[in-house]
Image (cartoon, helix red, strand yellow):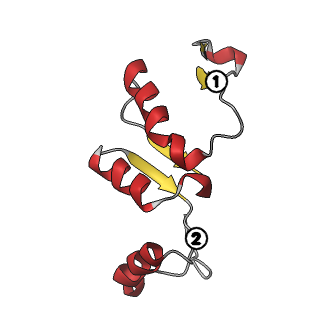
Amino acid sequence: MFQTSITYEERLPFFYVTYPGSIIDKSHLTYMMAYNETLGISKVCFIMDRGFFTTDNVKYMQSSHLSYITGAGISYKATRAAIDEVREDILSMRYLVIKK
């Protein structure tokens, strides 16, 4: 079941799906992406919490050429490997000063 609303002024989501709470996010990602395709949603960046993070889901998003931002626990081997690849290029924002 899904609901749609395209009236921005109402400040309601234009689409949402309700599903049983026993379905975990990480196993439901591909189904959610199928809804986006059906609705013609493209050229967006998906923001996902750590509940969606699995190596398979990351591979799926990349192979589907979908933009995404997701939290990933440092305990995952793939996360540590990805950080190690770019570690020398990571800059600390702690002392960043922007002059306007």
Local packing at callout 1 (Cα closer than 10 Å; few below 14, some 14-19, many 20+) is: few
Looking at the figure, which quarter contains the C terminus?
bottom right
Identify the disc placed on residue 13: 1
Which residue corresponds to the image point at 72% horizontal and 37% vertical from the top-left?
A: 21
Which residue corresponds to the image point at 42% horizontal and 61% vertical from the top-left?
A: 55
Looking at the figure, which quarter contains the N terminus?
top right
Q: How many marks?
A: 2
Q: Is residue 63 left or right of residue 37?
A: left
Report helix, strand or loop for mark 1.
loop
Residue 58, image x, y percentages: 40, 56
Q: Which residue is label 2 attached to?
A: 73
Quarter of image, res 98: bottom right
Q: Nearer the viewer, mark 1 or mark 2?
A: 2
Query: The residue under label 2 is which amino acid type?
Result: Gly
Residue 19, image x, y percentages: 65, 29
Which residue corresponds to the image point at 46% horizontal and 78% vertical from the top-left?
A: 77
Which residue corresponds to the image point at 45% horizontal and 25% vertical from the top-left?
A: 35
